[in-house]
Amino acid sequence: MLKKKVTMLGAFAVGKTSLVQRFVHSIFSEKYQTTIGVKIDQKMLTVNDQNLTLMLWDLFGQDDFMKIKSSYLLGSSGFILVADGTRKETIMVAKELYQMAIQHAGNIPFILLLNKSDLVDRWEIDDDELEKLEAIGWKIMRTSAKNGSKVEEAFYWIASQMLK
């Protein structure tokens, strides 16, 4: 069976762990759980008639005090950037993490997930910002770990890109 490492990157409290838990275990918890270091989950799936195990490396959230170590990216076949649609500053962190990821992991598949789409009435990230990123080739999906919207689709998308 083919195994692929996917690294989850994003600012503090954007929902990386919640997205992984929703995808792997179909659960969501309102209780916030801070990730310390890295938590690794896996899920077996079939993409384009090929069996694949995704090794999901859920890294702690980057903030002003804690910077992601580039060594966590070693061996990654893809990465998922996560931003919180209700916190504009998290898109800036995602851009920084993108630069670090491509510098250390190379030109591997990635996607930006704008999480918390269930809170669209509190959205702070405007469409102009997203259109600029899409214009330079970024794949972007609006997700909600809480209600599951687009979560499975996003993980299957990155899996399919890694198999190309």
Image (cartoon, rainbow, N blue to C red):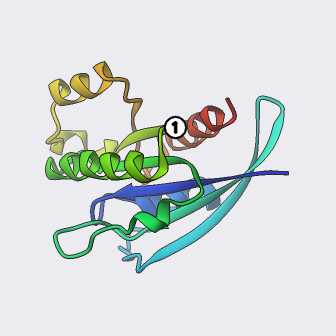
Q: In which quarter of the image is residue 121?
A: top left
Q: Is residue 55 above or below residue 95?
A: below
Task: Describe the element under mark 1 as helix, strand or loop.
Answer: loop
Q: 124 or 81: which is nearer to us? A: 81
Q: Looking at the image, which residue sits at the far bottom?
A: 36
**Residue 17 found in image quarter:** bottom left
Horizontally, residue 141 falls left or right of residue 51, namely: left
Image coordinates of residue 63 in percent, x first then y, are: 21, 67
Location of residue 7 with respect to 126 vertically, above or below: below
Image point (67%, 29%), residue name: 164
Q: Mark 1 points at which residue?
A: 109
Residue drawn at point x = 45 percent, y = 61 percent: 18
Q: In this view, does 13 lie to the left or right of 152?
A: left
Question: On the rendered structure, is 53 left or right of 20?
Answer: right
Residue at the image point whose x is 59% and y is 69% from the top: 40
Density class for disc 1 (Cα within 10 Å; few <14, some 14-19, many ≥20) is: many
Query: Whole-percent x and y of residue 5?
Result: 62, 55
Residue 27 seen in render: no
Quick check: can you spot residue 102? Answer: yes
Q: Residue furthest top?
A: 135
Q: Nearer the viewer, residue 79 or 99?
A: 99
Residue 25 % position (x, y): 63, 61
Which residue occupies the foreground of this view, 99 or 151? Answer: 99
Amino acid type of disc 1?
A: Pro
Residue drawn at (63%, 40%), measured in percent from left and top? 159
Query: Residue 115 location, x and y as percent?
Result: 35, 47
How many labels sit on residues? Answer: 1
